[in-house]
Image: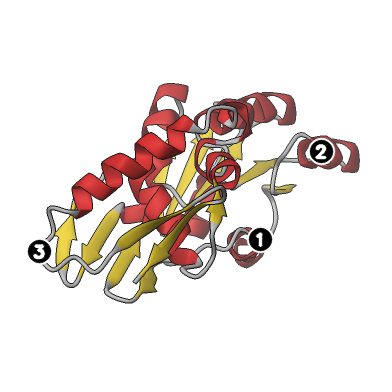
Amino acid sequence: MKVLLFHGQVGDPTALADAYGHGGYILQRINSLMDMLAHLPTAAILVIYAPILAGIEVMRLAHSRDPHIPVALVYDGLDTAQRISALEAGADECFDAGVDPREARARVQLVLRRCGYQEEVRCGDILIRPFERELQIAGTRVHVPKRELSLLLTLASSPKRVWSRRELLERIWGPVNARDDRLVDVCVHHLRRTLRTVQANPVNIRSVRGKGYALQL
């Protein structure tokens, strides 16, 4: 599991980095916004080490690119008012950088559990490893773009459920883009076309008239 650690150029993140680097995580340390945005698609969680106001702005930028990425804000000498501001702004967790390394790891694990993090999802002959962006169908590895993989992952997580277009829009594209139902239809079309290239493909994305889509195995 990959932890993306953004360092805002103030303070020393070494102890925090060591807590994750030695805790069984894959740690990616970055200090530029461009690098952060480039690495977001492969990260399970973003940890921002920066003063709270600057950290909140970095978090908002990250959420504009990926509205579902869990975020923890970390800094030295946090007070209650700063922590409340961070949580109200949308942070999933906020804690002082001076905490015990075991607590730092435990807080990240707690966030991931709340967000339903799974290293892999299996549904019939489908195997999805979300953060490696890997899809296998009946043992065959299939390359699909990020949006299409997110769509299949959502459907496979609850294969008997009919997902409305609005639910899929908000879950995959985020609330900012949840206005155009055609985004879902186009994504389903491309995903179906990709899946048809797999021999003996057992996956069928079923259209439910007036309701949305469901995965049929």
Q: Disc 3 to disc 1, how far (Cα)?
A: 44 Å
Q: Evaluate if marks 1 and 2 touch, with contact meaning CB atoms under 8 Å apart.
A: no
Which residue was labeled with disc 2? Answer: 88
Residue drawn 85% across the image and 41% down it? 84
Neighbour class for label 3 at 10 Å: few (<14), some, many (≥20)?
few
Question: Where's the N terminus, which quadrant?
Answer: bottom left
Kind of element beneath mark 2: helix
Q: Position of residue 4 (x, y in %)?
A: 46, 44
Residue drawn 61% across the image and 32% down it? 59
The figure's colour scheme reads secondary structure
Which quadrant of the structure image shows residue 216?
Answer: bottom left
Up-down: is 80 above or below 154?
above
The tag on residue 198 is: none
Residue drawn 63% across the image and 66% down it? 106
Residue drawn 34% across the image and 72% down it? 217
Is residue 39 something one can see in this rendering? no
Up-down: is 197 above or below 68?
below
The tag on residue 199 is: 3
As shown in the figure, which amino acid type bears the numbered disc 2? Answer: Glu
Q: Position of residue 185 (x, y in %)?
A: 41, 38
Which residue extends farthest left?
Answer: 199
Kind of element beneath mark 1: helix
Is residue 56 something one can see in this rendering? yes
- Going from N to C along the chain, the mark reached first, 2 or 3, is 2
19 left or right, relative to 81: left
Which residue was labeled with disc 1? Answer: 107
Neighbour class for label 2 at 10 Å: few (<14), some, many (≥20)?
few
Q: Evaluate if marks 3 and 1 touch, with contact meaning CB atoms under 8 Å apart.
A: no
